[in-house]
Image (cartoon, rainbow, N blue to C red):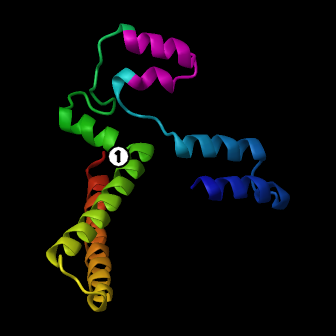
């Protein structure tokens, strides 16, 4: 998203599509959209500065309810934070790394006395198995997006 908006900010105005400041605003709002948790609302309001928002967050009790519902559960707040784009992509990438490393370790430990002749088959099995598990995990992460309101 960031690369596309940066390139669009450079090329778009040359063809009369938008302006550079517009693309900069779009880049900022795409990478850091509003986190819809009540305690963090002040960071996205235009009338507060970021330092005053931090001092308000520290001094006031933490309200983790979501802003788009009158009554929200802790699960709603957890889904809101987990599907916040920077957090979502970080968790997703770490989950994929964990899957790949775990499968490689498990497959290697199944055959401890491996000869050099058997190494390619273990590597192939590990890559294919991890790839299939990553596809399933990606589908599960897409299901998480459906839970977001």
Q: Does the magenta stretch include residue 57?
A: yes
Residue at horizontal 60 percent and vertical 40 percent from the top = 28
In the rendered image, the vertical position of residue 42 relative to residue 112, given as above or below: above
The residue depicted at 22 percent of the width and 83 percent of the height is 114
What x and y, as percent, mark residue 105?
Answer: 24, 67
**Magenta residues, start to end:** 40-58
Q: Residue at x 40, y 15 (%)?
A: 57
Position above or below: 22 against 68: below
Magenta stretch holds residue 62: no
Q: Give the image location of residue 46, x and y in percent.
A: 57, 22
The residue lying toward the viewer, choosing from 81 and 15, is 81
Q: Is residue 88 left or right of residue 49?
A: left
Q: Can you tell which quarter of the image residue 133 is in? A: bottom left
Pick the front one: 96 or 141: 96
Residue 140 picture quarter: bottom left
Residue closer to the observer: 8 or 51:
51
The extreme left residue here reads 110
Q: In which quarter of the image is the C terminus?
A: top left
In this rendering, would 22 be left or right of 34? right
Q: What element carries label 1?
A: loop
Looking at the figure, which quarter contains the N terminus?
A: bottom right
Rendered position, 149 above or below 37? below
Residue picked out by circle 1: 83
- Residue 100 vs 89, above or below: the answer is below
């Amino acid at each position: 998203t960031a690369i596309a908006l940066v390139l669009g900010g450079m090329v778009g105005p040359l063809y009369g599509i938008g302006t550079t400041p517009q693309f900069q605003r779009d880049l900022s709002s795409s990478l850091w959209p509003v986190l819809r948790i009540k305690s963090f609302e002040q960071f996205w309001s235009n009338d507060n500065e970021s330092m005053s928002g931090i001092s308000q967050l520290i001094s006031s009790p933490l309200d983790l309810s979501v802003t788009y519902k009158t009554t929200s559960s802790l699960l709603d707040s957890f889904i809101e934070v987990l599907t916040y784009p920077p957090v979502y992509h970080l968790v997703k990438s770490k989950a994929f790394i964990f899957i790949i490393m775990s499968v490689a370790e498990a497959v290697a430990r199944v055959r401890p006395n491996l000869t050099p002749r058997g190494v390619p088959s273990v590597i192939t099995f590990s890559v294919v198995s991890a790839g299939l598990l990553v596809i399933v995990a990606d589908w599960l992460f897409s299901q998480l997006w459906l839970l977001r309101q």
